[in-house]
Image (cartoon, rainbow, N blue to C red):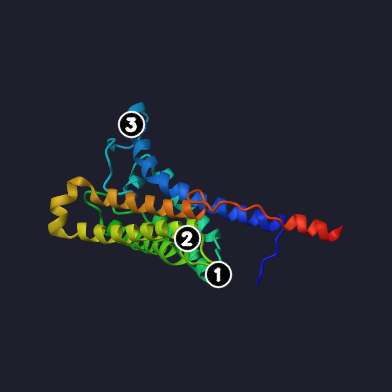
Amino acid sequence: MAQESGPENSILVISYLGLRKAIGILGVALPFVLPFGQILLHALGIQSSLHTPVIESSISSYYYTDMRNIFVGSMCAIGIFLMSYRGYDRRDAIAGRFAFVCAIGVALFPTSPLPTPTADEMLIGGIHLTFAALLFLTLAYFSLKLFTMTDPQKPPTRQKLRRNVVYRVSGYIMLACIALIAIAALPPIKAMVERLEPRFWLEAIAIVAFGISWLTKGEAILKDQEVPSTAPQKLAAKSQ
């Protein structure tokens, strides 16, 4: 069914583009805001936690620092934006709502604190990891499957083909990071790489990839050039 054109439809398109850009900005900014914010608070001497200004073991570990509210607030904001996202068909809405649940789960169920979590904290941490893995998998699905879809009645533009490359690269990066996080957690490998904080860096890369994918979908990157339409002039001529 063709969509009606008009001011309301134009506002709707702009709103969806803005929503996608907002999700992308949050994704790209989060891995930088958390560590630099913690370092800044420490430098200013106003931090209340005992953490030193070093890279935490994971993005989620900032829950136990003075950046807790930023982390939780960002995850909730991303979740709400994803819940509001509808896209072009029912799959977008379902994926958005599922990602919303996962993002809120990541925010409300904190990762296990180090170095000696209790049994309850380990259980909650396990729930957190499950939500985090499902969230990244859903975001990869957005990039690899939903964002690359093209209207079968229209040939894809050159920019659309380029955007599809960004979507696919971003999606595969997220999947690779998930796999590497699991590999780095294996006892023999963990003992060798733990001091490098691989989980933080892999999570940061995955989140930035997610953000770039959504910024591209919001046409902040590789936007199609607008072609002037002659339709208004034709309609005006017919009405005379």
Element type at marker 2? Answer: helix
- Residue at image position (27%, 36%) is 52
Would you identify the image quadrant in which residue 54 lies?
A: top left
Measure the C-alpha gap from mark 1 to mark 3. 47 Å
- Give the labeled residue for mark 1: 89
Residue at 35% across, 36% down: 36
Look at label 2 and name its amino acid: Phe
Q: Residue 64: tell me if it is visible.
A: yes
Q: Which residue is mark 2?
A: 100
**Where's the C terminus, which quadrant?**
bottom right
The picture places residue 190, in percent across and down from the top left corner, at: 16, 55
Residue found at x 55% / y 69%:
89
- Residue at mark 3: 42
At label 1, which amino acid type do we have?
Asp
Q: CA distance from mark 3 to mark 2?
A: 32 Å
SS of the residue at dot 1? Answer: loop
Horizontal side of 224 relative to 4 (left or right) equals left
Image spot of residue 179 (x, y percent): 26, 62
How far is mark 1 from mark 2, CA to CA?
A: 17 Å
Q: Nearer the viewer, mark 3 or mark 2?
A: 2
Q: Nearer the viewer, residue 4 or 51?
A: 4
Query: Few, some or many C-alpha atoms within 10 Å of disc 2 (few <14, some 14-19, many ≥20)?
Result: many
The first of marks 1 and 2 along the sequence is: 1
Callout in the foreground (1, 3): 1
